[in-house]
Amino acid sequence: MQIRFLHFNIVHNYFTFGKKKEIQKELDHIHSLNPNFWVANYSDELFGFAFIRVNDEETARDLIQDTFLSALRNQESFKGEISEKNWLYLILKNKVIDHYRKNAKTPLKRIYDQQSEDEFFDESGHWKKESLPNPFNQAVNNQQHSFEFYEILEKCKRKLSELQLNLFSMKFLDEIESEEICKELDISSSNYWVLIHRIKLKIRKCIEKLLYGK
């Protein structure tokens, strides 16, 4: 209905003001929805987007299904200002954040997260001697853009707890602002920075182990 209304306004402006070139430009940028082709055209790409953020195939598929259902129910909200692909990605991104928020509210997830990181620090919060990070050398830096390095990174991401993976994805994949992450996951700013710091440590230690066997 909104797209039809938009078309009406464009045609009205054309006859009223005679701005042919401007009107044609507006028409060229109007996008439409074709739900019958969503699964064939976008399911694989959407799955990849979801899986890299939740690290679970079944959860990723559920999120894709929820995305398509939500899009079908809310077609009237589509204004045609962006492509249907980008529109579906926006819906999926919100679904992923909802998934993060739900998991962050599970007490057991928080407890497990804290217990899993005790390997790095003693009771006073200081480094354990055996957990001190080794400096990366130039060889590692040169591999950062290699396929092998990203394969290792993906393996290390799988070792993160669910809360850690959620934070990693929101911070480093989706580049969401820290304040928004704290709000969405209902965590304090201090807890957020502690978790981010420990995520980096855990990823680094894992990469060192897989690269050098340390």
Image (tube, grey):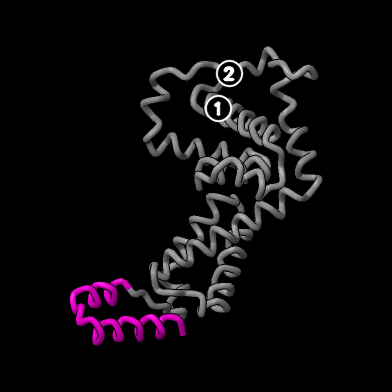
Number of the label disc, if any, that sits on residue 133: 2
Vertical arrangement, residue 124 with respect to residue 118, above or below: above
Instruction: Report, in whole angstroms, how far the alpha carbon at label 1 lies from the one at label 2.
Output: 8 Å
Task: Name the residue rendered at 67%, 30% in the picture.
Answer: 194
Task: Name the residue rendered at 24%, 72% in the picture.
Answer: 25
Residue 22: image quadrant is bottom left
Q: Secondary structure at mark 2?
A: loop
Q: Is residue 42 left or right of residue 69?
A: left
- Looking at the rendered structure, the number of numbered marks drawn on it comes to 2
Task: Name the residue rendered at 77%, 32% in the picture.
Answer: 115
x and y, in percent, of residue 57 in the image: 59, 57
Please name whichever residue, 123 or 98, is drawn nearer the observer in this view of the structure.
98
Vertical arrangement, residue 100 with respect to residue 19, above or below: above
Q: Amino acid at mark 2?
A: Pro
Q: Amino acid at mark 1?
A: Arg
- Residue 198 in magenta? no
Mark 1 touching mark 2, by CB under 8 A? yes
- Residue 11 in magenta? yes
Q: Secondary structure at mark 1?
A: helix
Vertical arrangement, residue 205 with respect to residue 28, above or below: above
For the C terminus, the quadrant is: top right
Q: Residues within 10 Å of mark 2 (few under 14, many from 20)?
A: some
- Residue, disc 1: 204
Image: magenta residue range:
1-29
Number of the label disc, if any, that sits on residue 190: none
Please name whichever residue, 110 or 145, is drawn nearer the observer in this view of the structure.
110
Residue 74: image quadrant is bottom right
x and y, in percent, of residue 186 in the image: 71, 46
x and y, in percent, of residue 168 in the image: 58, 41
Task: Name the residue rendered at 41%, 81% in the picture.
Answer: 3
